[in-house]
Image: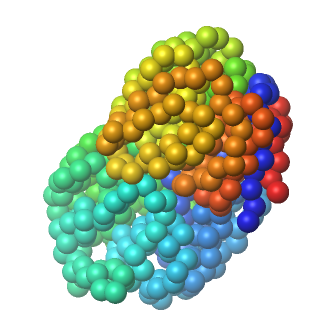
Amino acid sequence: MDKVIIKGGNKLIGEVNISGFKNAALPIIIGTVLSSDKCRIENLPMISDVSNLAKIMKMIGADVYLDENGFMDIDTKNIQKCVLIDEITRKMRASYYLLGAGLSRFKEVEVLYPGGCDIGSRPIDQHIKGFEALGAKVEIKHGVIKCSADKLVGSKIYLDVVSVGATINIMMAATMAEGTTIIENAAKEPHIVDVANFINTMGGDIRGAGTDVIKINGVEKLHGCNYSVIPDQIEAGTYMIMAAATKGNLLIKNVIPVHLEPVTAKLREMGVEVIEYGDSIQVNGDFDLKSINIKTLPYPGFPTDLQQPMVALLSTVEGTSIVNETVSESRFKYIDELKRMGANISVDGNTAVVKGIYKLMGAEVRATDLRAGAALVIAGLMADGITEIREIQHIERGYEDLVSKLKKIGANVKKV
């Protein structure tokens, strides 16, 4: 198996370009199913999840061309039905967006229950609630989810919990339903807005994305389009934390600064200098940092996807930091790996108490999931000695060309 080897101690200095946002790219690629036409999706991250999704689209009958320069041409007119009973769905949770897109276009869809990172229970009950409210019948047998409807009719749907996946899936399903659908207590993340903008570019009528009430007026048909995915706020936030962790100075380019405000606020609270420009952010971490408390929340709160990288940073900040994880129930599995490097962290339920130590020590560790892998990279960059990170397939699901980008800004890192 491949692994990443890091010799810690180098400050990260220079510029880094942020890729397209994985969490927007995946549902947008699947959303092309709605159009029965040709689409070009640009600013895609060149990561394993995108290449696996290209395979999935081909499996269901789309004509797909994925270019190494970060765009995908997709023609979905020859898709006859939306059925995907293949183990490839175990590799990525985003495969469940086929449910909403397939139901909207074909009124029938079958998908093997999705996989993804092991970060606790991730039920799809809110997705099912939404589909049923639109008039669909949903069955789950032998690990296969089947949705069917004679017709879909707009409805008012209240989500019991704020769910990004359910918001996007219901939004897709309602795109060509008869009448108007209103989603209340909807998720407000930037990629919700991006997916809505994409559907509207194809001729949809979605209003209110980015607020907690989204209104979808059903249309009869959608057409193809060219669309560029927004920058990845989680990748950007990871490099911001890396700059602080290594006492480096990075200009992080191709970002939307407002999407990063929760991270910017916490880094500034620690004593990091963060300067915002139009489409870039300068982060200078060469200061004595202070311990802080963090509580993860749905957007615009502090993102759960950056909890793990932030804990890695806090592990060497003097004082005690309290990190409360309210979004994902099992997102502290990586703590044992940080402890191998000397971190002093205790976990009680969904709360981690981080007592900062002077220095982490290099060790052999494994990435337990995508963002845990990013946390271990940050730990390795800070540590004395050599850190070897195994199971890096998790990292490659979400970070484009990580090793190459790190080398360009001064990290002593290699993939073997």
Q: Residue at x 25, y 65 (%)?
A: 125
Classify the position of the N terminus by image quarter: bottom right
In the depicted structure, whether residue 102 falls above or below residue 397: below
- The colour style of the image is rainbow
Task: Tell me which corner region of the image, top left, top right, bottom left or bottom right, holds residue 139.
Answer: bottom left
Q: Is residue 217 left or right of residue 271?
A: left
In the depicted structure, whether residue 162 falls above or below residue 121: above
Task: Tell me which corner region of the image, top left, top right, bottom left or bottom right, holds residue 343.
Answer: top right
Percent coordinates x, y for residue 361 in the rendering: 69, 34
Q: Nearer the viewer, residue 284 or 101?
A: 284
How many labels sit on residues?
Answer: 0
Q: Nearer the viewer, residue 90 or 186?
A: 90
Q: Residue at x 42, y 80 (%)?
A: 112
Classify the position of the C terminus by image quarter: bottom right
Q: Residue at x 47, y 50 (%)?
A: 333
Q: Is residue 272 left or right of residue 70?
A: left
Task: Tell me which corner region of the image, top left, top right, bottom left or bottom right, holds residue 108.
Answer: bottom left
Percent coordinates x, y for residue 252 in the rendering: 68, 30
Q: Is residue 254 visible to the viewer in this orientation of the structure?
A: no
Q: Nearer the viewer, residue 140 or 108?
A: 140
Q: Is residue 161 visible to the viewer in this orientation of the structure?
A: yes
Q: Residue at x 60, y 34 (%)?
A: 342
Percent coordinates x, y for residue 115 in the rendering: 46, 69
Percent coordinates x, y for residue 106 in the rendering: 37, 82
In the depicted structure, whether residue 387 falls above or below residue 80: above
